[in-house]
Amino acid sequence: MRKKMRVIALVLATLTIASACTPQEVQLYLDATAPTRDVLTADQLYRLRWCESTDNYAAVNPSGTYRGAYQFDQTTWDAVAGRHFPFLANRDPATVEPWWQDAMTRALWSERGRQPWPVCGLKV
């Protein structure tokens, strides 16, 4: 429990400093992501992200179909957003802030496990 509190404090501090978010915006993020926050660790997200996009949150595959760090297609992105973060629906995954891409990935993983990432999901 103590380690979890330290991690939450570190995330809170990092978000506040890196994003110039207000404390209210940070709290909104923490509240919105709470149900799936523990689905994947930061290390697991990194391994998935590295495999999918070499850690590039703005990545777009050559066909243009798969976008962002975790290579979402727009249909999947919009469906997950609709269930978890409606304000992210219809946004290009490659242009969404990294912390929201991470949150969307955790949300999708909570629903379907590694299935959406048949190759890179094995590295998690």
Image (cartoon, rainbow, N blue to C red):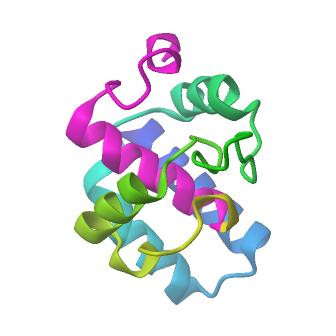
> Looking at the figure, which quarter contains the N terminus?
top left
Asked if the stretch drawn in magenta spans residue 115, the answer is: yes
Q: Which one is nearer the viewer's eye here, 10 or 57?
A: 57
Asked if the stretch drawn in magenta spans residue 93, the answer is: no
Query: Where residue 98 sits: x, y (%)?
Result: 65, 57
Q: Main secondary structure of the magenta part?
A: helix
In the image, residue 117 sits, relative to residue 39, either above or below, namely above
In the displayed structure, does residue 75 sit left or right of residue 21? left
Query: Where residue 76 sits: x, y (%)?
Result: 37, 52
In the image, residue 124 sits, relative to residue 24, either above or below, namely above
In the image, residue 47 sits, relative to residue 111, either above or below, namely above
Q: Choose top left, top right, bottom left or bottom right for residue 106.
A: top left
Q: Which residues are magenta?
A: 96-124
Query: Where residue 13 sits: x, y (%)?
Result: 66, 64
Q: Which one is nearer the viewer's eye here, 18 or 2?
A: 18
In the displayed structure, does residue 121 sit left or right of residue 46? left
Q: Choose top left, top right, bottom left or bottom right for residue 70.
A: top right
Q: Which one is nearer the viewer's eye here, 24 or 5?
A: 24
Query: Where residue 9 sits: x, y (%)?
Result: 55, 57
At a point 45% along the width and 74% down the height, the residue shown is 88
In the image, residue 19 sits, relative to residue 76, either above or below, namely below
At a point 41% along the width and 81% down the height, the residue shown is 87
